[in-house]
Image: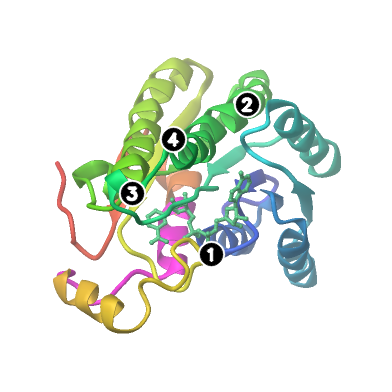
Amino acid sequence: MGLKGKVAIVTGGAMGIGKAIALRLARDGAAVGILDVNLTKAQEVVAELEEGGTRAFGVQCDVTNYTNAQEAVAAVARNLGAPDILVNNAGVDRQQFFLETDEKLWDWMISVNYKGFLVISHVTLPYMVEKKGGVIVNMGSDAGRVGNAREVVYSGTKAAVMASTKAMALEFARYGIRVNAVSPGPVQQTELLSGLFEGEIGEKIARLVPLRRLGRPEEVADVVAFFCSEDSRYLTGQVLSVDGGLTMVD
Ligand SMILES: NC(=O)c1ccc[n+]([C@@H]2O[C@H](COP(=O)([O-])OP(=O)(O)OC[C@H]3O[C@@H](n4cnc5c(N)ncnc54)[C@H](O)[C@@H]3O)[C@@H](O)[C@H]2O)c1
């Protein structure tokens, strides 16, 4: 219960890795605000959290829309309290060869994955600066560390998130705010790539992973919880791969 009394915001917390993060931070004692475009699914997670005794609040939010984001974060602050923790998890992906993609797809991916991270951070950081403390955990990806074929744009957006993580950590350390990123490898059972990692392809990828299996959303959530906890109080500006050893980046 290391996060008792803390208020956490999880973007994209209605499904997949974000949902696992919301459940894990709740288990650690935090009140949890879920910002997601999918309000129905967000409310299902809120109901599950409340059933377990957690104070939770769901709000529809497109992370790319500044006004929407500002209002959503303010609604969480009104209902649960000013945020101490922000997990920038919302993200989108489409695996496609670069020459088969178009400008519309690039704009969408850059907007959700990179601008969305900037927007939510920009509207949440003032609460943390005021409190002189806080934690931000950003969702990178190994695609952004080593590159992935059929993910040219996605890899770039995630590299951008991880680079800005370090710059943000430098700017906000003076306020006692820590900023880190997790960088998952392939994770099973999420909607992101619509079951791409299930079946034969999943088994093929698993054979390439030193630990011989794909990651689970809960295993990413465990590392996010570590970055949110006091156990990581001397860490900021770090990127940690959660990938069974698939990439071993310095
Ligand atoms: N699944 C993987 O293998 C994997 C690997 C590396 C990194 N990641 C990253 O982890 C994060 C979560 O991925 P996931 O696999 O759980 O995906 P998912 O598709 O299962 O869930 C993504 C969530 O984000 C929400 N969302 C999408 N666009 C949004 C927007 N504009 N505003 C607000 N919410 C929005 C969706 O509604 C959904 O709830 C993403 O940032 C993704 O890039 C995933």
Tell me which label, 1 or 4, sits earlier in the chain: 1
Q: Residue at x 75, y 26 (%)?
A: 67
Q: Position of residue 106 (x, y in %)?
A: 43, 38
Of residues 208 and 45, which is closer to you in this image?
A: 208
Q: Position of residue 50 (x, y in %)?
A: 79, 66
Q: Residue at x 63, y 38 (%)?
A: 63
Tell me which label, 2 or 1, sits earlier in the chain: 1
Of residues 233 and 122, which is closer to you in this image?
A: 122
Q: Which disc, if any, is residue 16? A: 1
Tell me which label, 3 or 2, sits earlier in the chain: 3
* In front: label 3 or label 1: 3
At numbered mark 2, what does the secondary structure look like: helix, strand or loop?
helix
Q: Position of residue 181 (x, y in %)?
A: 39, 41
Tell me which label, 4 or 2, sits earlier in the chain: 4
Q: Which residue is mark 2?
A: 128
Q: Which residue is mark 4?
A: 103
* In front: label 1 or label 4: 4
